[in-house]
Amino acid sequence: MLGAFANAFRTPDLRKKILFTLGILVLFRLGSVIPTPNVNVKQLDVCRTQALDPSNAGAGLYSLINLFSGGALLQLAIFALGIMPYITASIILQLLTVVIPRLEALKKEGAAGQTKITQYTRYLTLVLALLNATAFVTMAVNDVLLPGCTGLVYDEGIFAIAVMILTMTAGTTIVMWMGELITERGVGNGMSMMIFIQIAATFPASLWGIKNRFPGSQGWLLFAGVIAIGLVVMLAVIFVEQAQRRIPVQYAKRMVGTRVLGGSTTYIPMKINQSGVIPVIFASSLMYLPVLYSQFQPESEAAKWIQQNFVTGAHPVYMAVLFLLIVFFCYFYVAITFNPEEVADNMKKYGGFIPGVRAGKPTETYLAKVLSRLTLPGSLYLALIALIPSIAFILVGANQNFPFGGTSILIVVSVGLDTVKQIESQLQQRNYEGFLK
């Protein structure tokens, strides 16, 4: 591994890309700690500490927000919204592609159509960023952003509030631009790298907080145990994320003019976790909606029931509902992203077939059956990984920002694997070029 890193930095082009990516990420983290104008930083620090305390009723909700923003949102920083408006816009466009024929036609047009969809995604990101910035600034001004916290802003005038909203919106636009720069001129996918760095930025504080829950050697023992468990979980996630079912496909020979084409053998790679981390994000977001409702209507009977069953994340009702939601969203997301009928039609069009399976409808049925069987273990795996923070809360009293579990570990491992693969691919291209010369 060390040799691969050394080779990467010896290659001028790859070294330039890596340093460029690191420079953009440093600027991104710098903007995540610089507060927007008109923010009372001292008061905000006190309130944020109280909100993230495990004894607080809404600690789980604020821990999730803190996780995805890398701590920027609860600091009302310039890049407070981070990359989440872009991710939300991308998911919305992806879902609308299945529903709106015009978007589906653009998707099939190739690079030109994808460029148009990307442009729509940027516009939708700007709209979502403006709405989110307005919502969070309004909550901060009205003293409802953090529990029992007042005086987060110095000036409540319209001009000062407008400046805060425009600053956060502009920050999201800059973040989106920097992410695209990383994708074009750096290493890895820019948006994924930014999510990675936001989540990784919360790891040291989370681990140190777990260590401080117990005094003396007991705290250090717990700290070492959490590190060991984290490594085991990461190995398990890497193993499952790399696992795939390879369905063999053969292409018949055909004459095109005087040339014989086809006759090759390939395969369709179908991953066990076909849906990635999207089901966990969807399910977690839905699970915190009742908690948010209970904070606005604390005196109602429904709010009291929610406080008893959904707040800590360790209640059996919460764990069961989260488990079922993740399984449901796994099947839902796979159903809209992988179309067996389209794959079977494309194979038939180009003379491909699965050995032992007739082309056309039988191939579609076979692919749907294999996909259904793979989705079941994949959904159970995602659900179990997502429940690790709840189990940690029961065992050691760690809050929902437990670093080695749930959405955080899935994103960190997935992005890390993808980035390493891209670096290895570029290294191999360099070696092959030298070998052929």
Image (cartoon, helix red, strand yellow):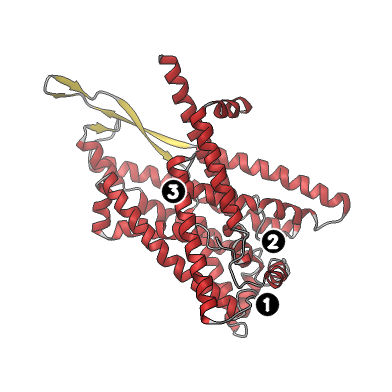
- Foreground label between 2 and 3: 3
**Which circle marks residue 149 in the picture?**
1
Quarter of the image where one finds residue 92: bottom left
Other residues around mark 3 within 10 Å, as few (<14) / some (14–19) / many (≥20) = some
The amino acid sitting under disc 3 is Glu
Q: Secondary structure at mark 1?
A: loop
In the image, 142 versus 383, the foreground residue is: 142
The residue shown at (59%, 58%) is: 32
Q: Earlier in the sequence, mark 1 or mark 3?
A: 1
Query: How far is mark 1 from mark 3, CA to CA?
Result: 37 Å
Residue 301 in view: yes
Classed neighbour count for the residue bearing mark 2: other residues with Cα under 10 Å, few (<14), some (14–19), many (≥20) = many
Q: Amino acid at mark 1?
A: Cys
Give the Cα distance between marks 2 and 3. Answer: 34 Å
> Relative to 13, does residue 99 appear above or below in the rendering?
below
User: Mark 1 touching mark 3, by CB under 8 A?
Assistant: no
Q: Which residue lies at the image location 87% right of the left edge and 49% below the top edge? A: 217
Q: Is residue 389 left or right of residue 380?
A: right
Residue at the limit of the structure toward the bottom, as seen here: 299
Q: Is residue 88 left or right of residue 43?
A: left
Dot 1: within a 10 Å radius of its alpha carbon, few (fewer than 14), some, or many (20 or more) residues?
A: some
Horizontal arrangement in the rendering, residue 315 relative to residue 88 (left or right): right
Return the residue found at the far left. 257
Q: Give the labeled residue for mark 3.
A: 180
Give amino acid for label 2. Answer: Asn
Q: Which mark is residue 399?
A: 2
Residue pictured at 56% horizontal, 68% vertical: 288
Query: What whole-number distance in Å separates the C-alpha atoms at marks 2 and 1?
Result: 21 Å
Image spot of residue 43 (x, y percent): 70, 73
Instruction: Give the percent coordinates (x, y) of residue 370.
Output: 38, 42
- Residue sitting at the far right: 216
**One can see residue 384 in this view:** no
